[in-house]
Amino acid sequence: MLLREIRLQNFRNYEKAELCFKPGLTLIRGANGQGKSNLLEAIYSLCFAGSFRQVRDEEMVRFGSSFYYLCGNLLSNELSYQMEVGYAALQKRKVVKVNGNIEKRGKFNRVFPVVFFVPEDLEIVRRGPEERRRFLDRELCQLSSAYAADLNAYRRALLQKNRLLREQRHSPALRELLSPWNRQLVKYGSRIIAYRNQIIQRWAEKAGQNYRVLFRYGHKLEIIYHCSLAYGRLGGEPAADAAQLAELMSREIKARESEERARGYALVGPHRDDLFFFLDRREARKFASHGQQRGIVIALKAAQVQYYGETMEKPLFMIDDIFSELDEERRRQCLLLFEAAAQVLMTVTGENKETELYLPGREAASLYIVQSGTVKEAKLN
Amino acid sequence: MLFSPALNRLAEAFRRLPGIGPKTALRLVYHVLSMEESAVQEMARALVEARRRVRECASCRNLTEEENCPICRDPRRDPSSLCVVQEPRDVPVIEKSGAFRGRYFVLHGALSPVEGRGPAELKIPLLLQILSRGEVKEMIIATNPTVEGDATAYYLAEKARPLGVKVMRIGFGLPVGGDLEYADELTLKRALEARREML
């Protein structure tokens, strides 16, 4: 996918801005607080307009104005899409147009292959399982609308079951009502686990290789999908299909029935799963340095980029502030990984050694300089 | 703001209807003012009468003005086949198809613990009582294909099977006369899951 141009009006700190992009690497340079990240956010909002990805529209309207408007042109699978997003703050009304046609909200479910790295993504490694599940679900929903539908149904059934589990503690008669919800949880949950397992295995392979590129004499990175069902881990083993998983999950629910009743919430299912990151078999959350943790997330994001490239089309890769905590060599190696993207948009602060920033084998990078809400194209020298 | 308390009250009353916001309510208020008084009275009577006369059929819970609804009283309907639907509005839809000649049971909702709807609220005990009389041989569950509708179907199936009733779930799939390409992915997925061998 290629983003060719974007125009912003009253978006965050931009009154008006217009940018054109080429394939390959584009650097967006500026000091802190000038609006680099806002630019990437605008692109993100445009690409995911009308999709299930939630964006907080009110916050994006420039201070003192009543609306924002974004429009841009992108090319996906050799077709061009003229995207427009407008949001009126007072009416709380959002209009999405694709090629001039108004899309009913949520109806435009063409999802463009975009991978976005933001500093908060480091929490995937550093923080708890909830962040990891959120990351996982967000990215998998983008890959598969069937996954998104299963996840929705699963969450609904889980909500209902948890309500019953809470209330049965003082009215035991409710217990007989649990089984229809369990059946639904098993049906949707097993499909969710199977898909997670399948994709994570593909990501993990690639991320392991990517980590080797970043840290040439470094540790071995393993990413393992930890499924709360009986056997604990699924990674490495031949992919269990949804039917087997359903069987397993159904047995596990039965086995832990009394425990669930006592605790008052559901203990079995993909909502309890986790993703483990190991460096040489030691858990990265506890033992890896900040630089290494950053390396892990970069390796994972690059794996997503590569996966898109292999299964759909080469994606747009947006990278916000990736270089802090990385040394010179890591930065250079990093750029090697981005080759799998059709286009890379990257924010940078300083001016150090930017002349070295080339995507190998491609034309030289372009550069935009951002200063308090204005953007200027410049030459790299 | 309206300067008449009576109009304010009317606007507020309209707003209790589904899909009516403050602006639509005002438009309706002004329209009512422009109507003949007799027409307004007719309308008011129709509202009250409908509310007063219509009740649930004692055997199927469909809406009716008598003790039993016309379908339950019709001797030509097949008493061995029972179709369970979620809402009263589902009955005329199935009736229009002309493909079902049995009787109905209307749940008035689906199981939903978060909304406080359990089997008692849906009068499932009454349904089970009907089934245990032995007249019904086949029950077709036509609740909506949502998480709650499916859960209700599972629950009913579990309860009905020990009573010796054959439990069927209504089929889900492609709209007839439509092109495959226009079906949404979820419908197609469900249609593929419910594929049948051709005989």
Image: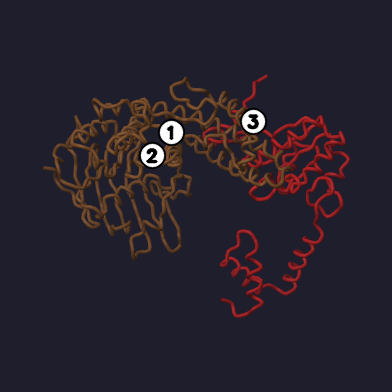
Chain in red in the render? B
Mark 2 vs mark 1: tell me if same chain. yes
Residue at the limit of the structure toward the left, as seen here: A381
SS assignment at label 2 = helix
Instruction: Check disc 3 and report the residue beneath it.
Output: A254
Residue drawn at (72%, 43%) of the image: A172
Three-letter residue code for mark 3: Lys
Label of residue A275 in the image: 1
Residue drawn at (70%, 33%) of the image: B169
Q: Earlier in the sequence, mark 2 or mark 1?
A: 2
- C-alpha distance separating marks 2 and 1: 9 Å
Give the image quarter of residue A283. top left
Chain in brown in the render? A
Three-letter residue code for mark 1: Leu
Instruction: Check disc 2 and report the residue beneath it.
Output: A124
Question: In the rendered view, would you say B13 is above or below B55?
Answer: below
Compared across the picture, whether B62 is left or right of A6 comes to right
Compared across the picture, whether A381 is left or right of A334 comes to left
Residue drawn at (22%, 56%) of the image: A374
Q: Earlier in the sequence, mark 3 or mark 1?
A: 3
